[in-house]
Amino acid sequence: MKTKILILTIVIFGGITILFDACKKSDEHAISSGYHPTYLTFKIPAGWPTPPIDIFKNNPLTEEGFQLGKKLFYDGRLSKDGNFPCASCHQQFAAFSTYDHQFSHGFNNSFTFRNAPPLFNLAWMKEMHWDGGINHIEVQPLAPITDITEMAENIENLLKKLSIDTAYPRMFAAAFGDTTINSQRMLKALSQFMGSIQSFNSKYDQVKRGEASFTLAEQNGYTTFKAKCNSCHTEPLFTDNSFRNNGLSLDPFLKDIGRMRITGKPSDSLVFKVPSLRNIQYTGPFMHDGRIFSLLQIVTHYQTGIDITQPTLDPLLKNRLSITNQEKVDLVEFLQTLTDDTLLHDKRLVEPK
Amino acid sequence: MSGLFLSNCNKTTTPKTGTIKISFRNLVGTQPILLDSSIFSNKFGEKYSITQLKYYISNICLINDKGKVTEKESYHLINQSLPASLSFTFTVEENSFSSIQFLIGVDSLRNVSGAQSGALDPLNDMFWTWNSGYVMAKMEGVSPQSNQVGSKIAYHIGGFTGVNSVLKTVQLDFPIGKKLLVEQGKVNEINLEADLNLWWQHTNNIKITELPVCTTPGEMAKKIAENYSAMFSIKEIVNN
C-alpha cells in the first residue's frame, strides 16, 4: 500500500464520508499491492534542448504503460467501425505519417481535412496539429477519436469496447495498478506510447556525433540549409515549434486559415506550425494540405513560389529565398540525410501480435 | 461515532472538522426548470425551452474577516439532468464564514494539464477536442425565434486564455448578520439560486433572433459569460 501514488483514507464519520488525502500525489484509484511496474527513463539526446514541459511528470513512463499505449494505437476498435486505428493514418514506415497520401482516409469514405503529420519527438512539441489547437499530448487523441472524418467514435462507447476485451483489463492493471478502464488512463497510455517515439539516429545525427561523414553534396546542402532554412526549421529538432506563414496561397476549396481558426486573430491568418524536416523523405506529400509532392518542388516554392502579397507572410521570406539550382540539388541531398532508419524499423514500435 | 484513522504520514492531532453542503437551484425568474418541457420567456419576449444545462463551479473558497479556506480539488459540474450533481459536500476545519467565492468554469491551469478525471473527464462532453479547453457553461434548447435547423439554440461558452477568457469569479456575501458555522458532526448548508434569464440580459443584450448559436471562444462568448456571472444569489444559509 506504500506506493508513490495517492493514498486515500476513507473515514466514515457520523454517516458522512470524508476524504483525507495524505502526503503524496494523486490518482483516484486505490492501488493493489501487486503493482510493480517497470519504470522507464525518457532519454534526451546529448546536446538537445530540454522539452518545454515534462510530459511524463504526471504520467510516469513505464514498460506496461507503453505496451498498453501501443496496443491502443494499433487497435481498430478505437474507431466506430473498427477500420481506422491511429496506425491507419500514422504508419511506421512513413515515420508515422500517412504514406503517399495528400489526405488520409477516415470513417465513412471521408478524407481528413489536413495532411497527416509524422509522429516523433512529440515531447518537444508544446502545441499540436497544424494550427496548434491541441495544448497537451494527452488530450490530442480525443480529436481523431471523435472527429467524424477520422475515427467517428465516442469515448463512452470506446471504453465499453475496451472493458469487455479479454486483454485490456489486465493491461490497464499492469500499467496503472487496477483494472479500472477510464478515459484518463487510456489517454495517458496513448501518450506514453506516442511520446516515446523518438528520432535521433539519422545520418545527420551520426555525422554530428562523429560516427559518419557527409558527402560533398550533403555538406554543401547543409551549408545552404543553415543559411536559408534553419531559422525556422531549427536543428536539432528541425523545427522551432513556432507558427508562421511560409507564403502558400489560400486554397479556395479548403479555405484553411490555419492558426486563426484557434486564436481568432487576423495576424494568425494562413499561419501554420513549422513542421520538423526529420524523415522528410518519407512524409510527403508536403505542407498542411499536402499540396507539394517533391522536395525539389519544395525548394522551388521558397525560390519563386512564395506569395509575397500576404500581409501575414513571415518577414524572413518577404524577398523569397535566393537559392541557385546547384544549391537546390545539394539541399535535397542534405534533407535526405535526415531519414532515421532506426525509427522506421524500430521493432519496439511495431504492431503487437 | 466511528473512529478516525489516518494514513502513514506523520500527522499530529486532527483538527475538528465539519461538513458544508452547497446546493444549486436553477430557475428562470422564479420558475423551476423542467428540461424539454417548461417554456420560458426572456426580457425581449423571446420564448425558449431548455434541453440541456451544465456549468462548472470550481475553486470554491469560504471567506471570513481573517482570510479564506479553499476546497481541495474543487471541481464540480452542475448538470440539470442529474439531480445528484446539484449539490455536494466537503469538509473544513471548524470556523465561521461570511461569504463564498467560486469560479464559473475551469481555471486556465487545468485547461492545459492533459487528461483529467472526475468532473473534468472529457466523457462529460464539456471538452473541445479540436481546440483544447473546457466548455465552461453550456445551454441548449429550442426557440421559435431561432433560425437554426429544428429551431435549436446552443450556447457553449468557453475560452480561457488572454482576451478570450470567459472565466468569472463570483463572490457572494451571506445575508447581513448571518454567518455560516462549521461545526463538528454537523452538515451546514449554503443554498444558491441561479436565474438563467440573466444569460440574455444583464450588462449585454443577447437576443435569440440575433444569436441562436455561440459555440466558439470570442467576443460573444465573453458577453454571455459577463451576463451569467451575475445569475447567482444566496437563497439561504442553514446552520443545523
Image: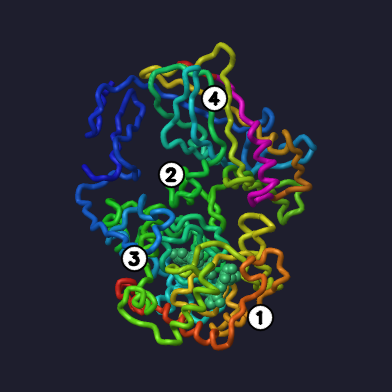
CA distance for labels 3 and 4: 56 Å
- Tell me whether the residue at label 2 lies in contact with that at label 1, contact meaning CB atoms closer than 8 angstroms: no
Q: Callout 2: 10 Å neighbours few (<14), some, many (20+)?
A: few
Residue at point 32%, 25% (across, down): A13
Pointer 2 indicates a residue of which chain? B
Front position among marks 1 and 4: 1
Say if labels 1 and 4 share a chain.
no
Viewer-nearest residue: A153 or B158: B158
Front position among marks 2 and 3: 3
Disc 1 residue type (three-letter): Thr
Pointer 3 indicates a residue of which chain? A
Disc 2 residue type (three-letter): Gly
Find residue B118 and name its label: 2
Residue at the limit of the structure toward the top, as seen here: B177
CA distance for labels 1 and 3: 37 Å
Q: What stretch is highlighted in magenta?
A: B214-236
Expressed as whole percent of the image width and height from the top left, the position of residue A73 reads 40, 67
Question: Counting residues from the N terminus, which is met first, the one under dot 4 or under dot 2?
Answer: 2
Disc 4 residue type (three-letter): Asn
Find residue A304 and name its label: 1
Say if labels 2 and 1 share a chain.
no
Pointer 4 indicates a residue of which chain? B
CA distance for labels 2 and 3: 37 Å
Where residue A243 sits, quadrant-wise, is bottom right
Say if labels 4 and 2 share a chain.
yes
